[in-house]
Amino acid sequence: MKKKPLLFFLLFSSAYILLPLSVLAQTIVPPGIGALSTSQPARGTAVLTGQLLSTGGQNPTVKIRWGDEDRGTAVNPSVAWDNEITVSTNQSTGTFSTTITIPNKEKIYYFRSVAENAGGTVVSRSLGVLNPSAPVGVSTLLGRWSFDDDNFSDILSPANFDNLQLWLDASDSSTITHSSNSVTQWNDKSGNGNHATQSTASARPTYSSASQKIVFDGGDILQVTNDP
């Protein structure tokens, strides 16, 4: 004999509604989490990002664990992570993130995401890695050097150095006074007027416009106007 589906009776006013019991019961399973990523908006901070692929039927609590050692994928590791941050207690699918202050810029840090609902707790198999020693993509950060003519010239400017006493720049031909490449004066670009000069012809260095160099040979010497 074919079994009839189990029905559940609901009473609304005077009407009866018959629904299969399976419709009324919702199974909650552990959530699904995906890849991790990181960005470093400033030298001393980083954004750690996780991804919730599925809620499992109930929006989970999501956390990010991080530290200078990877403590693995165990829900309750034998050695606790250095830090654990609750990002949301009602996370829908999509990305979630937290911003941290980097304790030591010379260390490498690791992180994993955690998601928990009534169906269970999962820890990401994906491992995030943060290397603060790497150059940071911020336009105002002097530590980000791109050695083309424009960027390098912007960094190498007297205005970028405090308490500068002397700045001699052989690549700036306008600062060099010479007679048949025999240098008589090399102007100081620091703004302090500490120009380097030589009145004795036999002691003058030679300027090469092709290589943008001043060559000192034997007894060649330039004397600074004011001793810094």
Image (cartoon, rainbow, N blue to C red):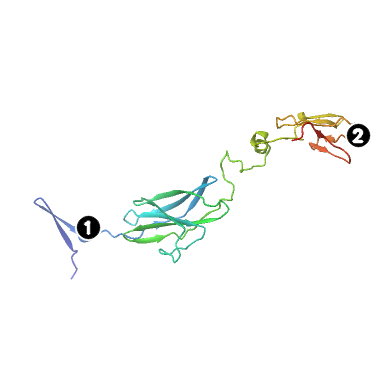
Q: Which residue is mark 2?
A: 202
**Disc 1 residue type (three-letter):** Leu
Above/below status of 204 relative to 87: above
From the image, state whether disc 2 or disc 1 is nearer to you.
2
CA distance separating discs 2 and 1: 103 Å
Q: Which residue is mark 1?
A: 24
**Disc 2 residue type (three-letter):** Ser
Q: Secondary structure at mark 2?
A: helix
Q: Is residue 109 visible?
A: yes
Percent of width and height locating residue 30: 35, 60
Percent of width and height locating residue 32: 39, 57
Above/below status of 161 relative to 5: above
**Residue 149 left/right relative to 185:** left
Q: Secondary structure at mark 1?
A: helix
Q: Is residue 54 visible?
A: no
**Residue 220 left/right relative to 2:** right
Say which label, 2 or 1, has the lower sequence index. Answer: 1
Would you identify the image quadrant in which residue 207 lies?
A: top right
- Contact, mark 2 vs mark 1 (Cβ under 8 Å): no
**Residue 116 left/right relative to 135:** left
Percent of width and height locating residue 226: 77, 32
Q: Looking at the image, which residue sits at the far right? A: 202
Pick whichever, 64 or 50, lies toward us.
64
